[in-house]
Amino acid sequence: MSVFKHLQAVRVARADVVEARQRVAEPAGALLDRGRRHPLGTVSVAAGLGFVLGQLNVHPLRVPGLGALLSGSAAELVMQGARLVREFSEGGFDAP
């Protein structure tokens, strides 16, 4: 590849990052706002998950491949979780 093709690829990648950050900003902000409104619920969920994982003797880095998955896809997982919480809190899910 020539230098110009590399530069173009970098520009495209940077534009993709900016777009992804903008898509994540709103749901993540809504999730943070919900956490600020309900701090006890947020701490309770985190403590409950920690207790369950501790009882199951599950540590993310002990499972082969899970450490790389968490480090590589953490932003995508946070984005999906924030979107689900936002839709759930807005009543976006249709009941069957």
Image (cartoon, rainbow, N blue to C red):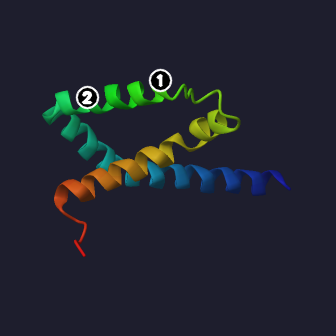
Q: Secondary structure at mark 1?
A: helix
- Residue at figure coordinates x 42%, y 30% from the top left: 52
Give percent across and percent down for residue 41. Answer: 20, 33
Looking at the picture, which amino acid does disc 2 mark? Ser
Q: Secondary structure at mark 2?
A: helix
Q: Nearer the viewer, residue 93 or 21?
A: 93
- Residue at figure coordinates x 26%, y 37% from the top left: 32
Q: Is residue 90 above or below residue 77?
A: below
Q: Is residue 55 left or right of residue 60?
A: left
Give the residue furthest to the front: 55
The CA span between labels 1 and 2 is 15 Å
Q: Is residue 48 left or right of residue 93?
A: right
Q: Is residue 8 above or below residue 57?
A: below
Q: Nearer the viewer, residue 44 or 72?
A: 44
Q: Is residue 62 left or right of residue 79?
A: right
Give the residue furthest to the left: 37
Q: Image quarter for residue 42?
A: top left
- Residue at figure coordinates x 59%, y 35% from the top left: 71
Looking at the picture, which amino acid does disc 1 mark? Gly
The residue where tag 2 is placed is 44
Give percent across and percent down for residue 27. Answer: 31, 50
Give percent across and percent down for residue 34. Answer: 20, 40
Give percent across and percent down for residue 61. Answer: 63, 27
Q: Is residue 26 left or right of residue 3?
A: left
- Residue at figure coordinates x 62%, y 41% from the top left: 69
Q: Nearer the viewer, residue 96 or 28?
A: 96
Q: Nearer the viewer, mark 1 or mark 2?
A: 1
The residue where tag 1 is placed is 54
Which badge, 1 or 2, comes first in the chain's sequence? Answer: 2
